[in-house]
Amino acid sequence: MIRALSAVVVVVGVLGCTSQQAFASDWLEPGVYPVADSEQGGETHAFGGAANLGNLTIEAIPDIAGMASTATGDGYLVASADGQVFAFGDAVHRGDLRAIALSSPVVDLAVTADGDGYWLVTSRGVVYAFGAALWRGSVGHLELQAPVVDLEPVSSGRGYWLTAADGGVFAFGDAKYLGGLASRQLYRPIIDLLSTTDGGGYLLIGADGAVYPHGNARFRGSLANNGVSSSLIVAAEQTFDGTGYWLVSQRGKVFTFGSAIHFGQMTAHELAPVGAFAVSNSDAGYWMMTTGAPGIPSDSGEGRRVIFSNERHRVWLVEDDDSISGNFFVSGRADRPTPDAYKVFSKSRHTIAGHDDIRMEYMVRFTWGVEQAIGFHNIPIDGIGEAMQSEAQLGSYRSEGCVRLRDDQAAALFNWAKVGTQVVVVD
């Protein structure tokens, strides 16, 4: 009886791992992965007519906060989370915050229309103005429901909007408040605000690629409720005339809408994801800059554990002293399993699903039941011997339940996580 029950648990443990229909592409060779286009944080990748004018790899900046083109398009400014500003091309350094002990990180940099100044804003909503940029107010004195993520100036330069992750919008100077989303239950946080050229409207951009128009801003498409919306969007920019916009994922995939032109994209390494994006002033090209891999999420438990973030499409292997032994892109299913603390209860070096002859290696199970039969394993192989997704698609939702890793990383997790190891699932 005990042996029969064990067999049932193994079968149920893989039912949620693969889709009911597996559609393989003939170029997906199992275990063969192209070299990622990035290697470390601070790299600049130029596309179209944008020139690569320099990077921050020597600086070893752990967290890039923002990037912005100059008025001519022949330069760019980059800000780090600790408030440093770096100028490239014809960009001019007009000051930064490196001598100040900040109570919250810098999250965005915005340049004035004439290029003679810029603003920095922190997650608490404190605004700093440099050069010709005019300070019009901040929300640093308020108790916010969610951190500030963006500063967007009006075209006159005499005002700006601050946007919070919950969709709250704060208008200063000439900027007009045209509505926000703080009273709505959002599927994913807001990451950016894009304003119209006349200041009469703006778009709020979600981390899932959702686009919410306000005022006279025109909706030209989004990734929400779409098969490709599984990518985590980390940056957005619009065309110079406001008739199109770009959305960019952490892996460097570029999505275009309206008149925005696709000049190319990249496949970023898990330790050097895309952290910032800027468009040249003539819309003839764009830049991406990589940042450091994210650290351990807050409120993710203690001790030796596996952490899985569903929204970030990432897994960490964390030691007792909170050092990180592994930091990987993964593919799971949206909102599964529910955030909670689990434990590894079973492992199998080789597993076969009871349908479609789908094979999985390095299975590490940490939930059970019809709705939550979930484990970690490699990218599965279908019945004709092809991988069911590419390595470049890790970092997006591709599974019907289980959490997929690259073969070598699945093996590393399999060897690292013993039965009984804690697994913490966070948003």
Image (cartoon, rainbow, N blue to C red):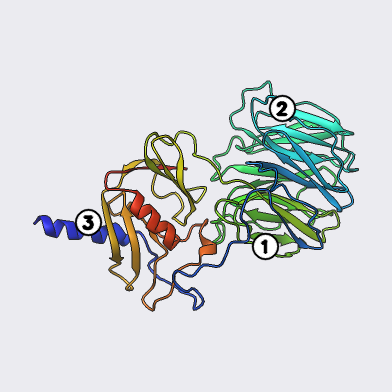
Label placed on residue 9 = 3
State the SS at label 1.
loop
Would you identify the image quadrant in which residue 46 lies?
A: bottom right
Q: Quadrant of the N terminus?
A: bottom left
Query: Which is nearer the N-term, disc 3 or disc 2?
Result: 3
Among numbered discs 2 and 1, the one appearing first in the sequence: 2
Q: Position of residue 166 (x, y in %)?
A: 60, 37
Question: Is residue 389 or residue 420 the one in the foreground?
Answer: 420
| Res. 402 in view | no
Q: Nearer the viewer, residue 408 or 138?
A: 408
Q: Which mark is residue 265?
A: 1
Q: Residue at x 29, y 65 (%)?
A: 350
Query: Where's residue 317, x and y in %?
Result: 42, 45
Q: Which residue is mark 2?
A: 126
Give the residue furthest to the top. Answer: 141
Query: Residue at the spot x=64%, y=28% of the render?
Result: 104
Instruction: Say which quarter of the image contains residue 268.
Output: bottom right
Residue at left offset 64%, top offset 25%? 103
Q: How crowded is the residue under tag 2: few (<14 C-alpha within 10 Å), some, or many (20+)?
A: many
